[in-house]
Image: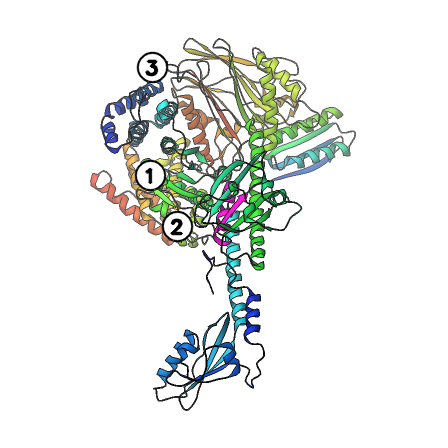
Amino acid sequence: MTALPLPPFTVTAEDGPGTARLRLTGDLDYDTSGELARAAEECLAADPRLADLHLDCAQLRLCDSMGVATLLLIHRGTTARGVRLHVESPPPFLTRILDVTGIGHLFALGAHGQESAQDRTDDGATPG
Amino acid sequence: MSTRTTAPAAHATSHAGLGPLRERMWTAVTDGDEYAASAHVLSALDDGTDAESVLLDVIAPVQTRVGAEWAANRLGVAQEHAASAIAERVIAALAHHPSARVEPRLGRIAVACVDKEWHALPARLLAEVLSLRGWRVDFLGAQVPTPHLVAHLHHSGADAVALSSSLATRLPTAHAAITACQAVGVAVLAGGAAFGPDGRYARLLGADAWAPDARSAARRLAEGIPAPETAGGRAPTGDLPHLADQEYTYVAREQVPLVREVLAQLERRFPAMAGYTDHQRERTAEDIVHLLDHLAVALYVDDDALFTAFVTWTAGILTARDVPARSLRPALDALAAELQDFPRARRLLDHARHALDATLAPGGRTPGAPA
Amino acid sequence: MRPAPGGSPLMAPQKEETATKARRQLLPDAGDAVLYPVVVADRTGTVVRVNRAAAALLADAAPGVGMARAVPAWLARAHAEAGARTAAPEPSAPRSSVRGKIGELGFEAHPTRHEDGSIAWWLVDDTDRRLAEEALATERRRTMFLAEASNVLLASLNAERCMQATARLAARHLADAAVVVTPPDGRQLLMTSAVAGREPVRTRITADPSAVPGLGEALQGFPPVPSRWIDPASLPDWMLPEDFPGDVGSVAVTPLPGHGVPAGALILLRAGGRAEFSESEEIFARLFAARAGAALSAARMYAEQNAITQTLMRDLLPPELHRTNGVEFAGGYRPAGTRERVGGDFYDLHPGGTDEESSLVVLGDVCGKGLDAAVLTGKIRNTVQALAPMAGDHERMLQLLNGALLTSHHTRFATLVLASVQREENQVRLRLTSAGHPAPLVVRNDGTVEEISTRGTLVGALPQIEARTVETCLQPGETCLLYTDGVTEARGGPLGDAMFGEERLTRALSGCAGLPGTAVVERVQMLASQWVGDGRHDDMAVVAITAPRTTHLSAVNGRTRGRYTA
């Protein structure tokens, strides 16, 4: 029983006019999240006129708390530069994490992310 | 205040007179009433009952009875947890009673359960008994990772370790713990059901001593257990030469694929499984995991009796829960088919299948499992 | 050779200079044609001829004297045996040589048989070879001993055990008794002394090490000082082991050089009448001291580091929970790594000042793992403690905590849940607030498991956060469970890679209705741990808040009342 070991995590970048897309596959965790932070930083630095940064999460298998911290770090960077950050095709587990941690509203969730994030509230509105 | 009775005659008397207290404790424990349980114990101590007798002749037998009642399906697993939680509280209350306060005058002993071992109560009882007898005791609790145990030995300088394990499946872990303690020059006294009724696995794994119960463990420690030789060390597989065939390694490492395969075969043999809920399917898979865990350990210690005893015990447990024990047979058959290239595993499985057939035959309920 | 009293197998067999001196006296100048001493004796065992060299060596050897008187016993016996064999028909059969000592010297005696039946014994001095062989054997024993000593000494990182091993080995192999002294801690000197063949004894006394000549310097460790011989009379009484046999003949003070830190000194004592240490023995003692010193200093450094770690760790370890202000609290914690004791999960209980005040429970999870994460938990726990008086408004409290944690350096955040707990009559009233944390679960007495619908934002990463507090009430026997996602995200199960998940947790809790909190915690921990099997898992923390089922205080008699009402 020797399965070929899958690479734990990969980031692939695609550029378009005014937009960048990072395709994430595998496990975004303590050991790999630095890689994503660097890739995002490179995207932001490469194009000063960037308007949208997309993180394609369809192939993400796992996201731990360091992964979430990295998403927050990228959000901090995009907000400072006026770039919109999109989390695309989040698998159900990621939607759930963003939902429980109360940060889903920071990321313009694309594809099958919306329905679970329905009760997120917009900035400033205090629930309950 | 009470006086401790240590003379054997006095002890026998107090033991005989403890029946009513045991019954009161049993009622309190099964009612989940820890306050009543503590009150019974404390007033017994106030009345001069020996603390060691309360631990070993009241609390311990009540816990044994809880286990037996669980096996017979007269108590739920949650009640079992509740009972041990209550026992823990009662022991804590007992330890604070003035009659249980003994100045340490003997050496220092570390009492620990091996990693992944949850049954802390036997070890806890021993720890209290040793304290009562004047040892300085560090009770490290349930599931102690071996690195923690060794670090403790380095900084405490304990004279010996009393290592407890009740689950046979923890024997490989216990082996690691025993050899690690010995490597730092500390003797290991092994105890608990995992090591076999006669302590055979304790000897096999090279423990420096073995004791069948808390009183003999205390006696054995008092006699003194010579420190193990650290010089040179033993040959790595010296204790268990049969491990060279890698059968244990294979079964332990390939557990998940083996479970999947056996599950698939069972589904072919039992059309009823198609109607199983996910939960039922998972329980079946867990049963197969238990079989494989015990098969792996039987390979580790190379002992047919260990696996056979587990299979017949499981048959009893299933029968008590109105689950047909014959369902074990096709699982064993499927395993035998999967492991046909492993002579020791095949031998163990053959032995267990014969024993299972013999167990099932007399009742006449299941003559010949459907294959 | 005279065996030394209590002679050790590692002592050098003989001093070489003595032997050389003896030879010079005995063999001043062999003027004979034959250089080797030769003794010829007949069949009856009577000396027939002696050459000059032999006469010089053997004072009693002269023609006509019996061999028994003329030569040492070993040679006389060899001659008698050879004579007996001459009865055999082959008189010229070659005879093997024999060995023995004459005075201080060693000889090999080679027989040559003459036709008349007499035998000439040619004596060849083999003292040098014998000494070399014996020295080699001694060195082998020493090497074995040093290897064994290293094994014994390095096995334990416990300083006390190392001191005992050092004293025991030194007393057995180097001297009649040995005392290991550690560098003074204040005015106190810690000594472990051993008399050969007995168990080491540990003593702590208030004494000035400079009372023993050379001890002060040796204890300083650096710069290293040579071991030195001191006058036994100068040894203070407190230094002498109680059961030392007889008078002290010689005393050596040897430093134990450690890893750049002073490890102590070794004092070797020999009984009166016993030979002083030879040069080779001193070298050997030094080699042993180097090993013992290295082991001792490693053990001492380990102990110091361990003490520091324990002190720093004390505040990072989860507290023991028990019944407080009429409410049962139970907690369980399992860090991710088996080598670690702390991690990124934490919980605390801040009891209300009185039964009427709420207690505050906090359970949380910081991002990251191991010690780094644990340090962050320490900061959060301290801040929460300082904010505990504001627990009447959870959201406000979380906002202040968020502000305190926010930094521009990173986005390491924490998720946590706050529970304000208040006993009212038989019930327990709860105010629960999640800050980005899995919702608490309540186990009702009928086995229903309720998820408490509190929601909020994680803390420490965003400038603004919000949170919604939810209230609930526990009837006697009911439990509210706070847990971290290490439990639900535990991967494993019979098929290997499934998450334990909320559904399994809920099902397990449903079977825990009415159980004491400790049993609920144990059950959840056990199931999650079994689910993981031997696989890796994240930190797992669980806290149970339980309304006590019964309060049988009336069942307790007057003397024991209040023992377990916390």
What numbered label is drawn on residue B219?
1
Horizontal side of C95 relative to B48 (left or right) equals right
* Furthest-bottom residue in this view: C115
Quadrant (top left, top right, bottom left, bottom right) of the C terminus of chain C? top left
User: Sequence-wise, which precedes: disc 2 or disc 1?
Assistant: 1
Which residue is more in the foreground, A32 or C241? C241
Residue kind at label 2, given as amino acid type:
Leu
Viewer-proximal residue among B96 and B301:
B96
- Left or right? Give the position of C87 relative to A63: left
Cα separation, mark 3 vs mark 1, equals: 35 Å
Residue C385 vs residue B218: left or right?
right
Residue under label 3, please give it. C556
Front in this rendered view, residue C120 or B121: C120
The crowd level at tag 3 (other Cα within 10 Å; few <14, some 14-19, many 20+) is some
Locate residue B351, reporting x and y percent: 30, 49
Report, in whole angstroms, how far the alpha carbon at label 2 lies from the one at label 1: 45 Å
According to the image, label 2 marks what residue? B339
Foreground disc of the pair 3, 2: 3
Chain at tag 1: B
Residue stretch rendered in magenta on the structure: C154-182
**Dot 2: chain letter:** B
Q: Residues within 10 Å of mark 1 (few under 14, many from 20)?
A: few
Tell me the SS state at disc 3. Answer: loop
Q: SS class of the residue under badge 1?
A: helix
Residue B26 falls in which quadrant of the image? top left
